[in-house]
Amino acid sequence: MGQGPLSGLKVVEFAGIGPGPFCGMLLSDLGADVVRIDRKGQGRASPADITSRGRRSVGLDLKNPAAIETCLKLMEGADAVFEGFRPGVMERLGLGPDVALARNPKLVYGRMTGWGQFGPYANAAGHDMNYIAITGALHAIGTGDKPVPPLNLVGDFGGGALYLAFGLLAGVINARETGKGQVIDCAMSDGAASLMAMFYGFKAGGIWKEQRRSNLLDGGAHFYDTYQCSDGKWVSIGSIEPQFYALLLEKTGINDPDFSAQMDRGRWDSLREKLAHVIAQKTQDEWTQIMGATDVCFAPVLDLDEAPKHPHNAARQTFLDVEGVIQPAPAPRFSATPGAIQGPPPAIGAHDRQALGDWGFSTAEIDALQSAGALAG
């Protein structure tokens, strides 16, 4: 049994890339028993493959009918299953939701795609940037000159993996109450659109301009932006509320009366230039000593080497060292049933016998699968 609030939850994951593995990591970190179905020839065992941590791997040759039957039997004993293939792939394998739900009516079947299971783009290839482009999110993020992809945090992980995990757990709760499973159509484009809810509200309220860097939260305001210090490093300032803004002026020593017009959009550019000049007089460390852990709403902008060493992150053990690989700890935190990294990233088929045995397969059945060439691990 895994450690965490999802201990006892049984999940089948069909190996994929991007948001699928991240969703599996989230569920595993909170204690779910996640068995990953790996295909022959896909090697994964590096400690650096962080999003594959904590699972057990069963390697199956999905061209083998015995392997397909094995997948269906695993689904019979699962609370949830999820896959990240293009629409129709699982159906062609004989593993689509109709077949799976016929075998296990309480199964929650998660489908992770960029565009969703239907719509004009449903069968087209794409990546994170494309999925968020049609939602308004990419247009709103970037410089005044061009949109800039925000890593793959908004589509793959925010709009994809997190919504898939949320949907799977909601579906399991419903299935336990009603006895009926269902299909979760999780499109990254849908999730990214959902994440934009507040900004569509701003638009409807007349307080959002389509021009980038002209709004309160997109770097348009001088009091909500990043600034370069004398050492070339950067700091973030988010002094929106009047009392926080007043503290910013106090801590920076600014007494220019022009800064009293905080919400005058027409002055934001000129005030940004003045604030940039002030910030450029000191190093990042000096500004951190002056404004860190205060109500200025300030934090240094750290790179991936620096972030795990920051005192706040260190105090909370936000990052862990596992086999020499620095990686984020499980989140969120639970007071009574804390999650944990359940194990390292597995090699393909590392748990063929153990996982199948734990999920109800007899030794004879496992031997037969091996003899038939169904096990690819």
Image (cartoon, rainbow, N blue to C red):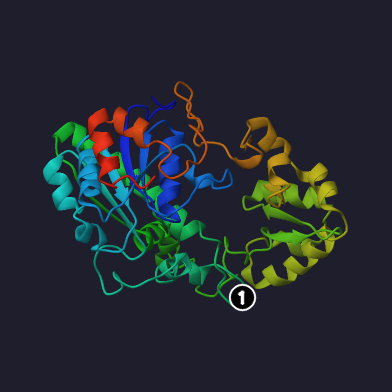
Q: Position of residue 43 (x, y in %)?
A: 47, 51
Which one is in front, 201 or 45? 45
What residue do we see at 62% from left, 50% from top?
A: 241
Q: Is residue 275 left or right of residue 32?
A: right
What residue do we see at 49% from left, 40% from top?
A: 53
The quadrant of the picture occupied by the C terminus is: top left
Question: Can the viewer see residue 124?
Answer: yes
Judged from this view, the residue extending furthest toward the bottom is 145
Query: Toward which corner of the image does residue 93 lie, by quadrant?
Result: bottom left
Say what amino acid the circle numbered 1 marks: Gly
Q: Position of residue 342 (x, y in %)?
A: 48, 32
What residue do we see at 66% from left, 37% from top?
A: 313
Judged from this view, the residue extending furthest toward the left is 102
Q: Is residue 134 left or right of residue 260?
A: left
Q: Which residue is mark 1?
A: 144
Is 144 situated above or below 12?
Answer: below
Local crowd at mark 1 within 10 Å, few (<14), some, or many (≥20)?
Answer: few
